[in-house]
Amino acid sequence: MTNLLVRMARWSAGHPWRGIAAWFLFVALCLGVGGAVGGHAATTEDFWIGEAGRAEAMATEGGLQQKPVEHVLITGRGAGADAAAKDAAARMKGLPEVESVSAPVRSADGTAVRVDVTLKGPELEGKEHVDPLIAQTAAVQKAHPDVLVEETGSPSISKGVGQLRSDDLGRTEMIALPITLITLLLVFGSFAVAVVPVVLALSSIAAAIGLSMLASHVFPDAGIGASIILLIGMAVGVDYTLFYLKREREERARSGGRLSARATVELAAATSGRSVVISGLAVAVSSATLYLADDVIFSSIATAAIVVTLVAVVSSLTVLPAVLAKLGGWAERRAVRRGRAPKAPKVGTGRITRAMLRPTSRHPAATLAASVLVMLALAAPLLNLDLTDMGRETHPRSIPAMRVYDRMNAAFPELKAAHLVVVKAGAGQADDVRAALDDLSRQAGKDPLLAGTSRPRTSPDGRISVLELAVPHHVSTPEAGRSLDRVRDEYVPATVGKLAAETAVTGDVARYADYPEHQKRQLPFVVGALLLVTFALTVWAFRSVVLGLIGVLLNLLSAGAALGLLTAVFQGTWAEGLLGFTSTGSIGSRVPLLLFVILFGLSMDYQVFVISRIREAAQRGASTRQAVLDGVGGSASVVTSAAFVMVTVFASFIPLHIMEMKQMGFALAVAVLLDAAVIRIMVLPALMLLLGDRCWWPSRSMRRARDRDAGRIPQNVG
């Protein structure tokens, strides 16, 4: 691997303009081909999970699947509200996007009227066709100024959420980019050099977006691919470039200006280039374990993370040597014109790092015990972790459709949620099924947790029937959950469950309940695979089983502490004002699994870089103790800088309005901070100092280096 990386760097550094032009041609080609082919968005069927998904599949087979529905809400009494409702219904019926329009329905207290509008096409695609309906609602409001005419529903809410997410991501870039540039400027002291990691990260993101469009035809995009590419792309893109840049500058400083820019680039490729490849593979393979979650959202996240990480690795190994050679050549020519040698950057351990390492080096056992206890204390709230799927009611009220949603639910509480009982039976059983559903409807009609039923719908061939039960509670409430349990465990078994037919319950509450359960079932497989690949990659990289075990344990420790802090902050209410959120008393069901996978991958960045430095020092003949102190001290500045950039990128997601994105940003920012400041500077070196040479077991190359240093075998062996 090292020889290949050096050859790549040599060619790139020797032909810098060709290398730079080839990279940006590659980026343009990725964007062009991706744009021409287009992306493939996930369909409604891709989101089917558990019993709810099975019920929706049966309903779809009979043409009875849920459709996208918008509600026109007219607030006002008397003839004005009735006239506006009739006008709205007439206008909506004339739209090609509309399948059907209900008769106006007045609320129980007489203060509002609603018109239900069903759109054509699958439920998930409603947001793409809702604009004409919103325009007609605005026209009705203009024609009837004496009443309030508004619109809400799944399509308009989904459209509002998408627009809010897009706006938030734009603001995130405006926050992260300047801070990243300032950080890199402080690290390198050169604006030209500081710009390089940012430009390469942004170009890697652009290329990854194009490639992800192609990949979406195999792994459909659930609508969050671009967000993940931005989140991961900025972090790893800057990290990998930073690792390479710092090593090139160190080699230049070590040579005292005697080596050319091309030579120092080749030396950096032989060392940091290998670390970048291993780190990139770690992130990609770790992300790939998300495919085991058997969920389109996680598959979409995995694809986005893998694509952008591999592109960032390629950019660091190809175009970066060309850029560094060019910058180094310019610096050399400027120095010649001024009649002095190029100024070498400073290397070594900073004062802060020395201060942090001092107790570790003197009292490793005490440092290890104290650090681990602190991390375990931070992880303690994890024992009370409550995972839920974030229901529609958790969306921010800055979305206009959500404010209308609240007013509509106040006037029509029966619209908050619904259970759909789906029955699939033989065509000759149609009468028995209808009778059983009527019996179920009568029993459910007496339940205070429900709010009435509609007439059963039956497919044209008489094989599939659907009964809708209204739920006057939001899906996230305990009452809604209990009502689902009663329908599934009592009403269905006592009625349609007695027939020789297939039955299942879906609806808003069922989807909300089944998704976290599915994640809990898949979690052991994903985490197990994640631990295995982390261990295997570490053993492969350093030929040490001990380091493989250390890597797994330390990653678990930092992930546990981050999840504990996440639980303490977001399940409580004490930080609501500080971080700008309203607590749901729970954590989004996708967040912990996503945190584990991404953190394990990103932690490998630091682990590979730090241990590589330690291993290099040990192979040069230093004792394990000295190698640990030199390796950690020498890599601390780049690890700290890279971590600060990552924390900035992730923390910029905390002000976002979407709860799961906010939680994800907070958890990743905290996890990276703890990993860089506590794990890599205190826990890891303390543990390696205590283990001594046992860290390298059973590495033959390390034993040979030790023997060679002791003079027991000739210098040219191994």
Image (cartoon, rainbow, N blue to C red):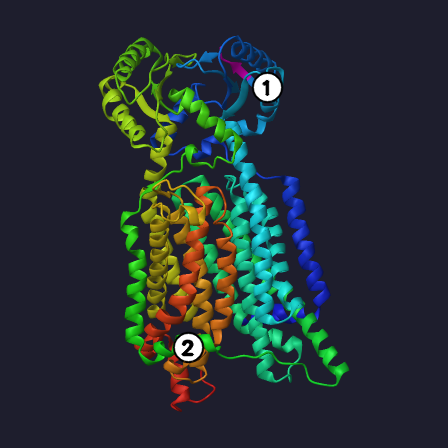
Mark 1 or mark 2, earlier in chain: 1
Q: Main secondary structure of the magenta part?
A: strand
Where does the magenta region start and end?
99-103
Name which residue type carries label 2: Ala
The quadrant in which the C terminus is found is bottom left
What residue is shown with label 2?
Answer: 355
Query: Can the viewer see residue 356 in this picture?
Result: yes
- Residue placed at 49% from the left, 43% from the top? 300
Kindly report the distance in space between the C-alpha atoms of the residues bearing marks 1 and 2. 68 Å
- Under circle 2, the secondary element is helix
Q: Is residue 164 above or below residue 691?
A: above
Judged from the image, the secondary structure of the residue bearing numbered disc 1 is: helix
Of the pair 221 and 375, the residue shown nearer to us: 375
Q: Amino acid at mark 1?
A: Gln
Task: Give the class, few, some or many, for how many residues have Cα within 10 Å of label 2's Cα (few <14, many ≥20).
Answer: few
Q: Is residue 113 above or below residue 198?
A: above
Percent position (x, y) of residue 106?
Answer: 44, 12
> Which residue lies at the image location 43% right of the left edge and 72% below the top edge?
611
Q: Report whether 445 appears left or right of 620.
A: left
